[in-house]
Image (cartoon, coloured by chain):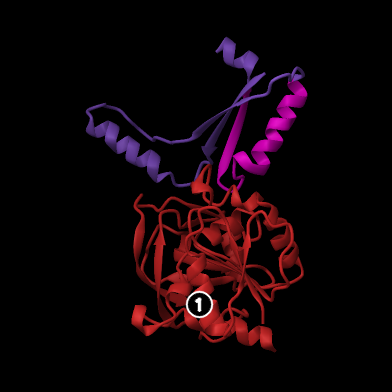
Amino acid sequence: MQAAVVVFPGSNRDRDAVRALTLVMGRAPHTVWHHATELPKADLIVLPGGFSHGDYLRCGAMAAHSPVMREVRAAAERGVPILGVCNGFQILVEAHLLPGALLRNAALKFSCKRVTLKVETSNSPFLRRYNAGEQIVIPSAHGEGNYFAAPDVVKQLEDDDRVAFRYAHSHNGSVKDIAGILSANRRVLGMMPHPEDAIEELTGGTDGKRLFESIVEAVAQ
Amino acid sequence: MKARIFVTLKDGVLDPQGKAIGHALTGLGFAGVGDVRQGKLIEIDLPGAKDETSVRTQLEEMCRKLLANPVIEDFKVELASQIQSS
């Protein structure tokens, strides 16, 4: 299995993503600079967390138009699994690969803490090692994670079982406590909390590791 | 030609920053402050541009593609002639 982590100017969780993928895949993923007009052959693309382009204009707005995103979009259309975490999620919604938008946290504060998430579905290559309804603990760190979408869009997400995670306790003002969502083909996952930072007991738990194990297992089949 | 683009949150989208500004104004003793909404003003210079209609079309395209997020924001384009008269 090959994976690629896209690095934007201002990304800062790219190395965390590389570390998690290396641990689970047994080999290091490619890292790809945002100016790239070609992606290496990859079975998984990760858009990491951080503050791409200094969050100018809107979080993820500039990165969504980076040259590399044309390739990411083409890969998404071919069904390549794509994971966007935190700023990566913001980039995915700005690129219209996922619906909705991420607004300033309702309390106007950057929130950095471990959060309890409820897994809403296991029906995705990213989620097959979780059970729908189970609760997991994942670190979260963001100032703009307040998920918003028009009521009809939220209803569609719920009707199609495309809400991946909800905060177990109201966290940042997100509509219906949504913490992560899936694309229509269930192969693009965007989420605010950081599964790549929950891969070892030493650093606070392994609930995020199963997400990477899920996708590795799914790709292997 | 100079243009001003106003980007504002759509009605129904929560604006916690606007709310905080409203609270601060009330705290400063300004009476009668109701709803406060915060937006963005973007000024763009288009040297050499003459035709207002095509400039407006171009600016609206910029708004849809980058300057505003249509999921949460509305935009309004003002051209130099309107700016001077206002």
**Residue B86 occupies which quadrant of the picture?**
top right
Residue found farthest to the top? B85
Residue A193 x/y as whole percent? 45, 67
Q: Which residue is at the front of the view, B24 or A200?
A: A200
* Label 1: element kind: helix
Q: The residue marked by circle 1 belongs to what chain? A: A
How many C-alpha atoms fall within 10 Å of the one at disc 1: few (<14), some, or many (≥20)?
many
Residue B52 appears in the picture as rendered = yes
Residue A121 appears in the picture as rendered = no
**Chain A drawn colour:** red
Question: Does B49 appear above or below A119?
Answer: above
Q: What stretch is highlighted in magenta?
A: B52-78
Q: Which residue is at the front of the view, A187 or A212?
A: A212
**Residue A1 occupies which quadrant of the picture?**
bottom right
A169 vs A160, left or right, is: left
Residue A189 x/y as whole percent? 59, 69
Asked if the stretch drawn in magenta spans residue A115, the answer is no
Question: Does A61 appear above or below B45?
Answer: below
B25 vs A91, left or right, is: left
Residue B41 x/y as whole percent? 52, 30
On the image, numbered disc 1 is attached to which residue?
A20
Residue A17 x/y as whole percent? 52, 71
Quadrant where the C terminus of chain A is found in the figure:
bottom right
Question: Does A158 appear above or below A100?
Answer: below
**Residue A168 occupies which quadrant of the picture?**
bottom left
- The type of residue carrying mark 1 is Ala
A14 vs A217, left or right, is: left
Picture residue at 26% right of the left edge, 27% below the top: B31
Asked if the stretch drawn in magenta spans residue B72, the answer is yes
**Chain B drawn colour:** purple
Q: Which residue is at the front of the view, A187 or A46?
A: A46
Picture residue at 51% right of the left edge, 43% below the top: A56
